[in-house]
Image: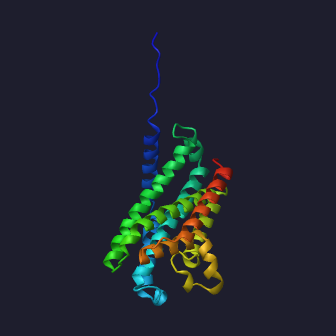
Amino acid sequence: MTTVTGSAPAPLLRRILLQGQYEALTMLRNGEQLILAIVLPLLAMIGLTVTPLLDGLGDSRINVAVPGILALCAMSTAFTGQGISTGFDRRYGVLRFLSTTPLGRTGLIAGKIIAVLAVLFLQVLIVSGIALTLGWRPDPTGWLPGMGLLVLGAAAFTALGLLVAGTVRPEATLAITNLLWILLGALGGIVIPAPRLPGPAQDAVHFLPSGALGQGLRDAFLHGAVDGAAVLVLLLWLVVAGAAAIRWFKWN
């Protein structure tokens, strides 16, 4: 008598990489996500270079503007983009289905993280390439701390996006993430530095993930410095939001 056995699942790493590839391609094929991830940050960068809003904060407008735009890219992809896609995956039962497959919940989350990092890498290449043609001259010693801070910021925003997507209805997730993208982008210290914000907001934004990431990247690319306070704030947001997402995330 012959026993028929099913084929063994692929190794976990391969499953995670394939899921990450699928998530990244899905994000890049979505026109709305592409506008949010690439087009709007580029328009904001150009707007900041042709207006006097950033005058007096550095040796050139473009040098002050680009770090904030890179931070905005991280928030767009990790928080708004990932939050919206996860929220609707949850609504249509995709998360519940995938969590019962060999990929598992851990593999699913790891795949989402890989997708965020892959899209962020493309954003950095595009924004940096265009910025360099416009005269951006970052401090060479700031690239390593800047990229490390960008990854940390993306992790914190991913945790926040998953927290929202896993606790409220998809329609509410869409509204919350888009509203916060606008508010944090305009008044959260991510694109516009704290000294240019209204008085009460100047101190408060440093405790927001947006303000910490924006200022940390400006310190890195303008002065080649590591902003320890920004690192600490982002780590706290990552730990708190991550723990809350693990505790209250609903898969269905």
| Most distant residue in the top direction | 1
Q: Position of residue 127 (x, y in %)?
A: 38, 71
Q: Position of residue 225 (x, y in %)?
A: 46, 73
- The residue lying at 47 percent from left, 39 percent from top is 12
| Most distant residue in the left direction | 133
- Does residue 24 appear anywhere in the picture? yes
Q: Position of residue 166 (x, y in %)?
A: 63, 54
What is the quadrant of residue 161 in the picture? bottom right
Residue 207 lies left or right of residue 19; in this view the side is right
- The residue lying at 57 percent from left, 46 percent from top is 95
- Does residue 166 appear anywhere in the picture? no
- The residue lying at 45 percent from left, 74 percent from top is 67
8 vs 69: above or below: above
Residue 86 lies left or right of residue 18; in this view the side is right
72 vs 97: above or below: below
80 vs 134: above or below: above
Front residue of this view, candidates 198 and 141 = 141
Front residue of this view, candidates 104 and 173 = 104
Q: Position of residue 157 (x, y in %)?
A: 56, 62
Residue 59 lies left or right of residue 90; in this view the side is left
What is the quadrant of residue 200 in the picture? bottom right
Front residue of this view, candidates 138 and 241 = 138
- The residue lying at 47 percent from left, 25 percent from top is 6
